[in-house]
Amino acid sequence: MRTGSAELPLHYGAAPRWLFSRMSRLAGEVAEAVILEHGTRGLLERFSDPFWFQALGCVLGFDWHSSGLTTTTCGALKEAVKGREEELGLFVAGGKGATSRRTPSEIVAHCERTGSEPASLVYASKAAAKVDSAAVQDGYQLYHHVFLFDRDANWAVVQQGMSDATRMARRYHWLSTGVRDFVCEPHAAICSDARGATLNLVAQESEGVRRASAEAARRPPGEVMAELLHLRRLDLPRRHAVTLADIDPTRLERILLKTYVAQPTGFEALLSIGGVGAKTVRALSLVSELIYGESPSFEDPARYSFAHGGKDGTPYPVDRVLYDRTIELLGRAIRRAKLDHAEELRALKRLERAFAGGEADASVRQGRAARSVNRARRTPQGPASAARSPSTTTSPSLFSLPQSDPAPRR
């Protein structure tokens, strides 16, 4: 299911090398800590949550509201797990731009090394990208796609599109849990500050037009093209958020020939046909309304960090000494946890909750870090230390999912 999305200002530029190297190291330590506590499935669940993902990017020190947070955070994780995939049980494929198009081949390469079956994973990657680029036409062109999965074929997708018109980026999150239908309300919530004219063919109310579009795609291309030419001469209602003005009839007819030969059984099968993109889906939705009286939904599905500073200096410049200290503390806690010294990892959880409390003074946090870990070393294991276990509190943490109320389903 698609679990949500986030709306971010479109920024350009890249993280400086000194920062990205630290981001990769810290992202690896955080990922390993979560895997130790909750397994790879727990980490995938967190990456599919737009709020947790945003918090992680802030902790890593990137611009807190920049579009680059998405690409850089994913890139840092991919770099962190490189060469350790089989040890961690976590695999990361894809990335930004041309790298995103290599996602299927990277999935296959990982599966060949582990002896897993890649077909279902490759399909999930392609389907998620096709839905957010063709079935939901919200004005954002995908340019980033990362696919994370484990040995049990659990997966998550973090992908992002950009709008040159609004200079905004929109991030989409997917999670394999509960996937039954890629094309009917695949998301649990979408978080966004902006809405726009959208052709939303994965809305529940678009079920009729999905069936009609698949039926139109099975018809001879000449019949469909005749209806489209007729549509060009109509004065369509102003409520229509889509037009035929930018559709090339020659190319569209070639695609319709492919759909006619393939005879898709449903809308999901239609989307899986190579070459069927936003313009083809748009044309078929209009033909479906004209012939079958099935109206698509035009409702935008969008509904609505400071641990080490930020790259752009907000809320304060990245504190390199504090950043390196955090990496050292977390790495040591993970190594000791593997040796059954779990109290130090619990101390890091208490420290993280202090970060989440909004304390802005880096020196205070650094001092508390040292005292927390030193106290953990002096405290013997027993009932007293167990009483301070993080399981007795509901404070937010990077080790747990956010406790905010879920957005209502549409």
Image (spheres, helix red, strand yellow):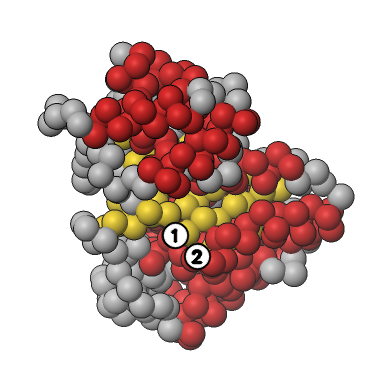
Q: Quadrant of residue 65?
A: bottom left
- Identified at 39% across, 32% down, the residue is 225
Name which residue type carries label 2.
Answer: Lys
Q: What element carries label 1?
A: strand
Question: Pointer 1: residues within 10 angstroms few (<14), some, or many (20+)?
Answer: some
Residue 143 numbered mark, or none: 1
- At label 1, which amino acid type do we have? Tyr
Instruction: Give whichever of 222, 34 is nearer the camera.
Output: 222
Q: Where residue 129 sits in the image (x, y, percent)? A: 51, 46
As measured in the structure, the alpha-carbon distance from the residue carrying label 1 to the one carrying label 2 is 6 Å
What residue occupies the far right of the structure in this picture?
Answer: 115
CB under 8 Å between callouts 1 and 2? yes
- At which x and y percent is residue 396? 42, 46
Which residue occupies 25% across, 39% down? 243
Question: In the rendering, at what x and y percent does residue 42 appear?
Answer: 61, 43
Residue at image coords 22%, 58%: 165
Q: Can residue 313 be seen in this view?
A: yes
Q: Can residue 359 be seen in this view?
A: no
Horizontally, is 370 left or right of 78 in the view? left
- Quarter of the image for residue 269 reads top right
When the figure is inspected, residue 181 is found, relative to residue 255, above or below; the finding is: above
Q: Which residue is drawn at 48% across and 30% down?
A: 221
In this rendering, the count of numbered labels is 2
Looking at this view, is 101 or 15 the one in front? 101
Residue underneath mark 2: 96
Q: How crowded is mark 2: few (under 14 residues within 10 Å), some or many (20 or more)?
A: many
- Front residue of this view, candidates 30 and 390: 30
Instruction: Please state the horizontal and vertical placement of residue 259, each as a whole percent of the image.
Output: 56, 33
